[in-house]
Amino acid sequence: MKFQFAVAAIAAASVSFAQEAAPESAIEVPAAPAQAAEAAPQQEAAVDGSEANKDVTVSVSAKDSLEDAFAEYAEKRGFTYGEKTEKGSIYYKGMSVVDQTVESATFIKSRSFAYERAYLNALSSYVMDFFGRETASTYMETFGNQSSDAEVPPAMTPASLCEKIGMLADAKLNQALAAAGVDPSRYEGAPIVEKRKLMQDTIVKSSLKKALHTSSGCLPVKTFESRGTDGRYYIGVVVRVGADCTTLANAFRLKKRPALCREGGLTVKEALPDTTDEMVQTFGVRLYFDETGTPALLSFGQFGSAYTGKSARMAERAEAQAQKQAKALADSALTMFINSFTDASEESELSEDVESSITFKADGDATQEEVSKIIDIYRSKIKQTGSDTMKGRTTVYDRFVTHPSGQRVAVCVRRWSFGQVDAVNEVLSGPKPEAPKPQPQKKTYDSGVRSSRTYDF
């Protein structure tokens, strides 16, 4: 089984939407025409997004890991994750396992959550690298008690003696428990008089990282889906950040046309993935340039129905809800790209604790214990919030497609464009007033001299 992923240059006029094909098929995308390649250098001066137009093919077999796909994609594109490219962009990657197996009715839903986790992981790497602050500490404690009285049982105290007497007084209760079929020995035992620590060797290392900053303009440029050797599916995403993306996000937020533009562009039909296989592999926001050469956004949302019953009515309702959820995901991705903040935190605690102790009981019994434990605690919290108006959004694709697993996926594609913003503004402002009709000129007959044609010979 082979995965093949492609990003094709289309007239050097758009940011690619082509995603990897289905596991059962391979799609070859032809390279861009020569004249388009020649025009690209002139356009790159206007917008850095042209670097996503290179023809790149990434092949991943079932035995390969998603990390291999990430590495090959970066090698073909000529960048290193987390490092600035010559054109000023920085790429980050994120991945997540699809928790549900392909046989599960909730597999399609789980894919959507896996993408969200992968995207947030990539986003967290960016925010932490750029704006994070870390507080770290390391300490070590060593203790030893080799005193001559370390293993001498302590004298019986009045409190422990009272406890012992109380337990002896429970003899009748023990008999009642035994009669009821309960083993009373489970509830017996001499009370602990004292526990002495003989030795302890502890080392603790902790760190806390926090970051809060705008995440507007973080553009997903590539998504992967791979079936690992463990039989589970994985979703991977590559995110690009750069000054050009931030500039465009601010323009979308302010609803003002940016200076970044291209000559020519794509229609919505041309900008959408060509096949259902590519469509089902596309998550999140994509940038392209419309027919006027103005930047526009497409946002892909996916979800599924987990209904497995035989009721046609319930099946229809479940699929209708899946379509609404796909639309909500597409709108959410648009909002996050246009205007959002990310609050990320990472907390880590690592420690090793070796302890030797002796425990004395009221009956004179002494037990020595040696305990060795390693603590490995990691806690991560990523929260992205955004807000934007719905002005300029419209649905350009809303239907069910078939995933290579055979399950149906509700895909909704929402478009944001300045042309749609203008159309909304025109509707809100009401009809334009009609231009005044020209008034007919009044006929006048002045007293000036008029004459006939001369017929003089």
Image (spheres, grey):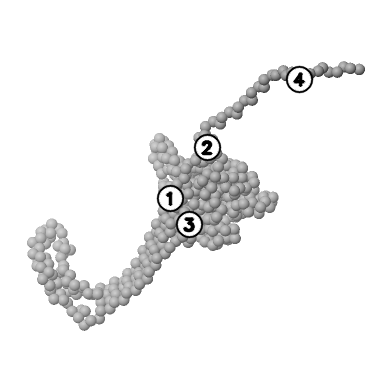
Provide the residue designation for mark 1: 385
Q: Are marks 2 and 1 in contact (CB under 8 Å)?
A: no
Q: Earlier in the sequence, mark 3 or mark 2?
A: 3
Residue at image location 47% in from the left, 54% down from the top? 214
What amino acid type is highlighted by mark number 2? Asn
**Disc 3 to disc 2, how far (Cα)?**
36 Å
Could you tell me residue 21's position as x and y percent?
55, 50
Looking at the picture, does residue 207 appear above or below residue 8? below
Q: Looking at this view, is 83 or 132 the one in front?
A: 132
The answer to which image quadrant residue 451 occupies is top right
The residue lying furthest to the right in this view is 457
The residue carrying mark 2 is: 425
* Image height of 8 relative to 322, above or below: below
The residue wearing badge 4 is: 448
Graded by Cα atoms within 10 Å as few (under 14), some (14 to 19) or many (20 or more), the crowding at tag 1 reads some
- Secondary structure under tag 3 reads helix
- Residue type of the residue flagged with mark 1: Thr
Of mark 2 and mark 1, the one earlier in the sequence is: 1
Residue 264: image quadrant is top right
Give residue 22's position: percent from left, percent from top: 53, 50
Q: CA distance from mark 2 to mark 4?
A: 55 Å
Front in this rendered view, residue 63 or 112:
112
Depth check, mark 2 against mark 4: the one in front is: 4
Quadrant containing the C terminus in the rendered view:
top right
Asked if the residue under mark 2 is in contact with the one under mark 3, i.e. CB atoms within 8 Å, the reply is no
Name the one closer to the observer, 10 or 399.
10
**Which circle's residue, 2 or 4, is located before the other in the chain?**
2
Q: Is residue 160 above or below residue 152?
A: above
Q: Amino acid at mark 4?
A: Gly
> For the residues marked 2 and 1, what is the alpha-carbon distance in whole angstroms?
27 Å
Q: Earlier in the sequence, mark 3 or mark 4?
A: 3
